[in-house]
Amino acid sequence: MKILRLGYAVFPTSKFLDLLELDEIEKVSFVASKYGEKLFEDLHRTAKFFGKEDLVKQKAVFNFVDRNLLQKVINRFNRKFSADLFVSKIYNFKNFKDNYDFVWIGDNGYDGSNLLIKKAKNFFKLPIYRSYKEIDYRKSRTEKDMLVYSDKLIFPHEQYLNLFSELYQLDLSNKTHFADLDWRYSKTVEWVKNLEVKKLSYFDNIPHVCILTGQAIWDPTDKLTGNRTYYIDIINDLIKIGAKVHLHAFKIVKNRESKQIDGSNPYLELAKTGKLIIEKPLNLYAGSKVLWLTEYCTTLLT
């Protein structure tokens, strides 16, 4: 089986090692923006740690699109106005015409990959599989087109069917499968679980909870993330039962569109109590001492 994978390379890319290990997979060609090249360092580093470098060489092909200024302007215009002008030119689909079994396009509403669906389907004349997770809960022409023209859909859970049925009056149940792609290579998970460490609770007899996230927001009305990265309430609940919370985040902001922390940050107020400890963000990869240290916490949330 040969797969052409288009779209944003969502971290962690080490998850693709489980796909490459399947006997029926002959080749996966990844096509992503130049920025995605850095994200795939996770896959290569994990493959090296577990001795899977030959597997990656044999089955994976990487194509990183280095867009010129005009293409970047077109892409930004497309995403802002939900237009698919010149998408096939930006991605140069003709360079990836091969004997593939299907095209897999991932993964979110914000990354512009909805715009690829119709163009890719018309160009390749192949089944289009669409994995889809982060959405903005508002009607969108490109989102509806994506839902209609995709031959198979992969959602994290069943509630997506209810949402899209309400928004677009579409019955998608006959072509939908459920799987959450936000996971790490299975052997990394096993490696972490088998580590022998003493948890922080061993030393102070207090439960410690780690929250690992890319961002933490403090505006509960932020609809773009569906409160998924709003942790104030759960932190307060954990503190009430006597736990200490360790928050590791790359950014702590009011909402997804914010770029700076301001003085009203309730996470900083909670940190003054000593019950919330705001830690440095973690660079997690297999074999990392940092990843090993996360097991000191009683609970690991990702």
Image (tube, grey):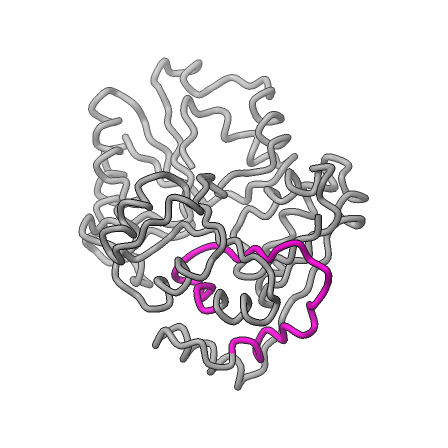
Name the spot of residue 201 as percent of width and height, x first. Answer: 40, 17
Is 109 situated above or below 194?
Answer: below
Residue positioned 28% across, 32% down in the render: 274
Q: Is residue 53 left or right of residue 134?
A: right
Name the spot of residue 158 as percent of width and height, x first. Answer: 34, 39
Q: Is residue 209 left or right of residue 131?
A: left
Q: Nearer the viewer, residue 139 or 12?
A: 139
Q: Quadrant of the C terminus?
A: top left
Q: Quadrant of residue 15?
A: top right
Name the spot of residue 109 as percent of width and height, x first. Answer: 39, 60
Q: Is residue 105 located in the magenta-colored stretch of the structure?
A: yes
Name the spot of residue 275 as percent of width and height, x first. Answer: 28, 30
Q: Nearer the viewer, residue 177 or 228?
A: 177
Residue positioned 59% across, 71% down in the render: 123
- Looking at this view, name the residue that lies furthest to the bottom: 70
Q: Is residue 100 located in the magenta-colored stretch of the structure?
A: yes
Q: Is residue 254 visible?
A: no
Residue positioned 48% across, 68% down in the render: 118
Q: Is residue 143 left or right of residue 65?
A: left
What segment is highlighted magenta in the picture?
Answer: 87-115
Q: Is residue 139 visible?
A: yes
Q: How many marks?
A: 0
Q: Quadrant of residue 231?
A: top left
Residue positioned 41% across, 21% down in the render: 298
Q: Nearer the viewer, residue 43 or 172?
A: 172
